[in-house]
Image (cartoon, helix red, strand yellow):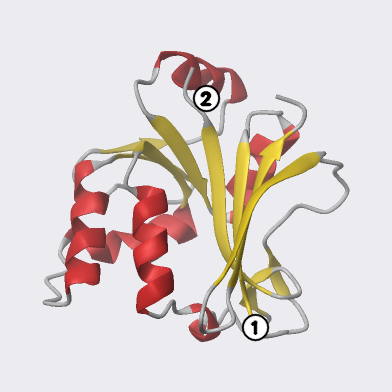
Amino acid sequence: MAKLIYSAIASLDLYVADEQGKWDWAFPDEEVHAFVNDLERPIGTHLFGRRMYEVLSAWETMDDPHPLMRDYAEIWRSSDKIVYSRSLQDVTTARTTLEREFDPAAVAELKATAGKDLSIGGPHLAAQAIAAGLVDECHLLLSPVVVGGGNAALPTGLRWDLELADQRRFGNGVVHLHYVSRSG
């Protein structure tokens, strides 16, 4: 069975964007970017909310000469994507399916039949999957900044028992925490 993995770059106070919607403090340096590329490389299908999809869809046509950027663009283009949105009219990227509602049973079936692991991106969509008991692993990349509020990386009002599987400190002060779900 494939795993469903939630990854997020967040502030130290666990926000993926500040109260103004900015996340410029979260841009990874080369060391962190290479690490993220390696995290994403084995993923076969990405599940996205609308906002996360709209941000990441730039990788579909990105033609950056930097090897790390080119590598991530290839990772993006070679994976399947499912976007969950009631408001998005159409998807603009290849290998992408649009779903109107998040269906936990359909995602459980996808996990059971997928040949590669799945990832879920966007904290609101991830919160639904976490609440449904579908998320097997969580990767948090904590940036050395406190933003004081905004879009939370993890849902409130929900208990999720985790076990620390790994951690890593990067030269720029970012810390990676890898957790596995104890409920799985």
Q: Is residue 153 visible?
A: yes
Residue marked by disc 2: 107
Q: Residue visible at 44% across and 76% down?
A: 28
* Residue placed most toward the observer, 80 or 98: 80
Whole-percent x and y of residue 168?
58, 64
Task: Determine which quarter of the picture holds residue 169.
Answer: bottom right
Q: Is residue 143 left or right of residue 55?
A: right
Label 1, label 2: how far apart the Cα atoms are: 34 Å
Query: 97 left or right of 138?
Result: left
Residue at 18%, 54% (x, y): give it: 74
The quarter of the picture where the C terminus appears is: top right
**What amino acid is labelled 2 in the image?**
Val
Above or below for 132 versus 153: above
Looking at this view, is 162 or 105 the one in front?
162
Q: Residue at x 18, y 44 (%)?
A: 94
**Dot 1 corresponds to which residue?**
144
Label 1 SS: loop
Question: Which numbered disc, 1 or 2, marks the residue that appears first in the sequence?
Answer: 2
* Labels 1 and 2 touching (C-beta < 8 A): no
Say which of marks 1 and 2 sits in front: 1
Residue 49 to residue 160: above or below: below
Closer to us: 118 or 66:
66
Question: Label 2's element?
Answer: helix
Residue 31 location (% of width, % of height): 39, 74
